[in-house]
Every structure is written in C-alpha cells, then in structure tokens.
Image (tube, rainbow, N blue to C red):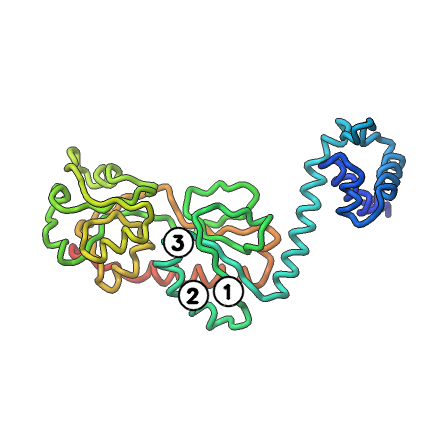
C-alpha cells in the first residue's frame, strides 16, 4: 500500500513554518535544525510532488498559489496534532480546567463543585471565571460553560438548558408588588451588561404601558443580585443565577410571568478534548446537577 505521506512529517512542518514567515533561519530555529536542512526539506518535497512550493527572491521565500491553496489545511493539520498531544498530556496530568462566567460560577456552579471533586478525587479542578470567549484549541482550558445563542466556530457545543428571565426581590419588598405597574414605585436594579431588557419582560406579561423604572445600576450581575438580596430593589434575574436564592427563600418572584429568551447555557469543548475521560465525567456530572435542579420547584410569593 502506498504511504499516505510521501513527504516526511519534518518536511511538511518545515514547509508550513516557512510559509508562515518566509525565512529559512526562523524555520530552522523553530525546528531545531540548520537553515540548509530546511532548504533541503523543501527542495526534496518539491521534487517528490513535482510542484513548485515557493518563489525564491533576495528577500526570502514566498508561497506559490499552489501552496497558498493548501496552506490552511496544512496549518489545521498541525494544530490538530498539537491539540492531540496537549490533550494527552493534560489527561495524564489529571487537571481539569473549566471556564464560565463569574455570575453563573459564583451563584450556581461553585457551590456544587465539591460534589464533583468528592466523586472524582483523582481529578484536580482548576477554574477560570471570565466572560471572555477563550480559544479552547489554543489554550489549556478543557471545557467551557458559555451563555449565549451558540454558533461558536471551531468547537463542539451542546445546549445544556435554555434560560428564562423574571423579576426577583427580597420577601419584604414583594409585599408592595401586587401588579406589574407597582414596579414604578419601588427601586429597580439594573444590570448594564444584561442581554435582555425590562421591555421584553413587560411584553411577555402583556403590559402595554410599562411604568417608568428607576433605581441603581451595576456593571456586573453579581453585585446587582447582592443588592436584590439586601432588599434594595427588584432585579431581572436569569433562571439559574437566582435558583438557589429562590429555593431557600432569600429571594421570591413577585409575579408568575417569566420571559423566554434565545439564550441558553452550553457545554463547549474541542473535538480532541471531548474524548478525554475527565471532560466526559464533568459533562455527565453537570447534566445530572442541572436535571436535579429542573426537577425541584422554585419558590415564589405567587405560588
């Protein structure tokens, strides 16, 4: 059987490196060989393929149109190899690196993580709390819990649970709220970075003429939720972020209406990292925790 690699892997790597930088010396330094060896790799590859890969000039080497056409595939192949080696090393290290937004992490995920580490003491957990979209293929992060509409390129994304939003407040404040129009007479806490507006909730509640809202605003959802817990106003909360405070009665829902959204929580990883046992165990544990929460009733003054 003919070899699927008529060109040695080292020669392919030399071609890819030179195509990115156009310098034999740069490629030689990265590959740990001499510039002459890189040049030989390229010439032998061109001879075997019968294709000119680089245009030679005093200023360096420039990829020909033939090489430019396959360069994205060549780069992708080496990225996959690097990803596979990195995944193998991370699997042996037994460290699981997870990222999620700070509000979801603080209010839902972190209080439950002891159950995961208790069930899997062989896995050391490292957590990165950030709203930034980390490049999972180019980092040591194994998986992410992202909030959004999905559609991220270059990753595997599984929808965990769709999210609704609804007003929440401390029990004492709820006594002043009999109908949505009463929101105009109490402080309303605003999260400046929220993906949904009060107008959308009023529309879901069938309120044609919403009251004018006023109250403190925050640039982060965590202090905004803390303000609601302290009785300082009514907050528009995401379902999971408020779940525990609702379950133990620190917060209540003054109105039964929840506004649907196109937003969901997603479990995100790469194709290579999805095969790791530690990632599969975390994914299964996360789904079990979410299923248990969905099965529990949510408290509220209206129910």
Sequence order check, earlier mark of 2 and 3: 3
Would residue 17 be found to the left or right of residue 219 on screen? right
**SS under mark 3:** helix
Query: Where's residue 239, x and y in %?
Result: 31, 52
Q: Residue at x 16, y 57 (%)?
A: 301
- In the picture, which quadrant includes the C terminus? bottom left
Res 69 quadrant in image: top right
Pointer 1 residue: 125
Would residue 182 be found to the left or right of residue 199 on screen? left
Query: Where's residue 11, x and y in %?
Result: 82, 43
Pointer 2 residue: 113
Query: Where's residue 5, x and y in %?
Result: 82, 45
Would residue 189 be found to the left or right of residue 122 on screen? left
Q: Are marks 1 and 2 in contact (CB under 8 Å)?
A: yes
Image height check: is 121 above or below 293?
Answer: below
Nearer-the-camera pick, 16 or 69: 16
Image height check: is 124 above or below 223?
Answer: below
Nearer-the-camera pick, 185 or 259: 185
Q: Are marks 1 and 3 in contact (CB under 8 Å)?
A: no
Q: Are marks 2 and 3 in contact (CB under 8 Å)?
A: no
Sequence order check, earlier mark of 1 and 3: 3
Nearer-the-camera pick, 156 or 211: 211
**Badge number at residue 102:** 3
Neighbour class for label 3 at 10 Å: few (<14), some, many (≥20)?
Answer: some
Q: How many marks?
A: 3
Neighbour class for label 2 at 10 Å: few (<14), some, many (≥20)?
Answer: some
Q: Residue at x 80, y 50 (%)?
A: 32
Would residue 115 be found to the left or right of residue 52 on screen? left
Query: Where's residue 185, x and y in %?
Result: 11, 44
Question: How far is mark 1 from mark 2, CA to CA?
Answer: 9 Å
């Amino acid at each position: 059987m003919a070899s699927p690699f008529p060109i040695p892997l080292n020669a392919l790597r030399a071609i890819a490196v030179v195509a990115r930088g156009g310098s034999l010396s740069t490629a030689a330094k990265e590959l740990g060989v001499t510039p002459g060896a890189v040049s030989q790799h390229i010439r032998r590859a061109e001879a075997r393929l019968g294709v000119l890969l680089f245009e030679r000039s005093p200023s360096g080497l420039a990829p020909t149109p033939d090489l430019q056409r396959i360069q994205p595939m060549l780069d992708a192949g080496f990225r996959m190899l690097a990803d596979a080696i990195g995944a193998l090393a991370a699997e042996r290290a037994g460290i699981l690196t997870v990222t999620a937004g700070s509000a979801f992490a603080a209010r839902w995920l972190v209080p439950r993580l002891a159950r995961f580490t208790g069930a899997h003491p062989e896995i050391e957990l490292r957590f990165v709390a950030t709203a930034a979209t980390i490049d999972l293929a180019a980092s040591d992060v194994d998986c992410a819990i992202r909030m959004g509409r999905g559609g991220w390129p270059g990753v595997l994304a599984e929808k965990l649970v769709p999210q609704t939003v609804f007003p929440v407040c401390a029990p004492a404040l709820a006594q002043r709220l009999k109908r949505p129009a009463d929101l105009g007479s109490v402080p309303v806490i605003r999260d400046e970075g929220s993906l949904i507006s009060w107008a959308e909730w009023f529309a879901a509640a069938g309120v044609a003429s919403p009251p004018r809202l006023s109250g403190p605003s925050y640039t982060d959802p965590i202090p905004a939720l803390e303000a609601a817990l302290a009785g300082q106003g009514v907050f528009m909360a995401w379902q999971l972020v408020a779940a525990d405070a609702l379950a133990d009665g620190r917060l209540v829902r003054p109105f039964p209406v929840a506004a649907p959204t196109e937003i969901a929580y997603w479990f995100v990883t790469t194709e290579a990292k999805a095969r790791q046992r530690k990632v599969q165990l975390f994914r299964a544990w996360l789904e079990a925790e979410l299923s248990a929460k969905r099965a529990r009733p949510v408290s509220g003054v209206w129910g």
